Amino acid sequence: MPPIPSPAAPSLSEGREIEDMIDRARVIAAVEAGRLDARSARTCLAHLAAGIEGNRQGALHDPLGGPLPQAERQALHFRIGSRETLLGLMQANYRLREAVIGFAETHRQAIYLHCAYGEPAEPRNFGHWALMADSALARDSERMVALYNRINRSPAGAASGNGAEFGLNRLMLADLLGFDGLVENTLDAAQSRDLVLECAGVLAIWAQTLAGIVTEILGHASPCERRMVLPLWVLRPSLLKSERAPEQLLELRHFSTRAIGFMSGLFTSESAASGPVERLGNQRQLGELANELAVRLEVLARVFEDLELVPERGTSTVTDAVYRSPPPELTRFLQDRSGLSWTDATLLIDAALRDLDAKSRPLSALAPEDIARAAKAEGFPAFDLSTDELRSLLAPELFIAHRNTIGGPGADSMASGIISAQARIRLGLNRLDERRRQVDAAGARLRAAMKAI
């Protein structure tokens, strides 16, 4: 297996690259506003390129009316950094969803026994289960897109809340920095805190989704279930020499729990943080968690690509195990055929199953004669039931096939669900590429404006 990448440096924290982007855009806007002449602007840009901080302070801040207010600078750092982080997270989520849908397509006909409260309940389909995971991840994608649209609004030119004291073109700054538009109210642009909390909320829900998926995979692969075979690269030797612990998945679940805890605490600490230092610390930690989350997503995507199902979990095993309690299809059929109430039809099947248990016969051996004998013993009227009819009612494949409603596990529903999910993923990736091109085009416009001075 190729090595899993390490977490990147957090995009949400302060960085020289973002700092230079902001100051270069301010220089271009100052030239357009007549605040700087071309010669002074070229000097400013040269100092920025050389990374000369002292010259930056004198040559850039003085002509622009002093240093950029801390509130505006912090808002710009957070929004630009968050934008880059969200683009990476959306890409990672689509990558995971592609792996999940690939698993669903491969195993769309694989049946397993679902247990409720420790008791066998009904047959289910692994493809249908994977589509459930994709549905949850799709909602996370939608939340991230909505968050991106709110974050990618420019606070540039807001100053400390009342706007710049000279006329920088805020729309021009937004365009040069790659934003979709403005945070129109300058006070809101400089002082609002809701986006940090919204980031935390979106990432916390997403982490919970991942923890739930991992928990289900671990359950299917547990020694008592053994429906799935985890890839060897996930496993590490455990204290029990006979077993190997799924370390990669356990780490992912532990990370999700830790991330949810931090983000829940952020709602308290962010609202209580009165100064920019505390708020910047929160943003930095949020960025670190977001970048680690992207790496964990790649791990889970590779797990889905390498997951295998245990071949010996065949149909007959599922049949015998599933229907320790009466299947609803059989109860409903007997109710319609015999005219019995639902309660009486259930009692009839229970009597037939007790007779099977007494003779140590599996449910797959149930015959029409067994039901007729139970009906006579319980005082119910006789009715016709063929062997083929009974077999069709007990077959897990038919149990699944009968659930062919929209979003169900039936073959047609599964095929439609997979095609629809693939189309949504392609559409999401196309829109993601458009957003990346928009940001890249803004960088190109900024470079072109610098050369034109």
Image (cartoon, rainbow, N blue to C red):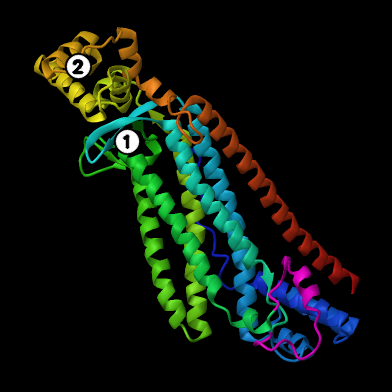
Report x, y in % for residue 349. 20, 22
Magenta-colored span: 159-184
Residue nearest the observer in this picture, 392 or 6:
392
Kindly indicate the quadrant of the structure image that contains residue 336.
top left
Magenta stretch: dominant SS? loop
Closest to the observer, 11 or 2: 11
Total numbered circles: 2
Is residue 324 at all visible to an observer of this figure?
no
Q: Examine the image and state in which quarter residue 309 appears.
A: top left
Is residue 401 positioned above or below 293 on the image?
above
Q: Residues within 10 Å of mark 2 (few under 14, many from 20)?
A: some
User: Residue at coordinates 81% horizontally, 86% vertically from top-left?
Assistant: 167
Please tell me whether residue 171 belongs to the stretch shown in magenta: yes
State the mark number for residue 362: 2
Which of labels 1 and 2 is toward the front? 2
| Residue 278 image label | none
Q: CA distance from mark 1 to mark 2?
A: 26 Å
Mark 1 lies on a secondary structure that is loop
Q: Is residue 80 left or right of residue 357?
A: right
- On whether residue 387 falls in the magenta region, the answer is no
Kindly identify the amino acid type of the residue bearing the numbered disc 2: Pro
Of the numbered discs in the image, which one, if any, rests on residue 221?
1
Percent x, y of residue 359: 10, 14
Name the quarter where the C terminus is drawn: bottom right
Above or below, comparing residue 369 to residue 59 in the picture:
above
237 to 438, vertically: above or below: above
Residue 382, percent from left and from top: 21, 12
Badge 1 or badge 2: first in the primary sequence: 1
Looking at the picture, tell me which residue is in the foreground, 59 or 441.
441
The amino acid type, in three-letter code, at marker 1 is Ala
Residue 159 screen position, x and y as percent? 68, 86
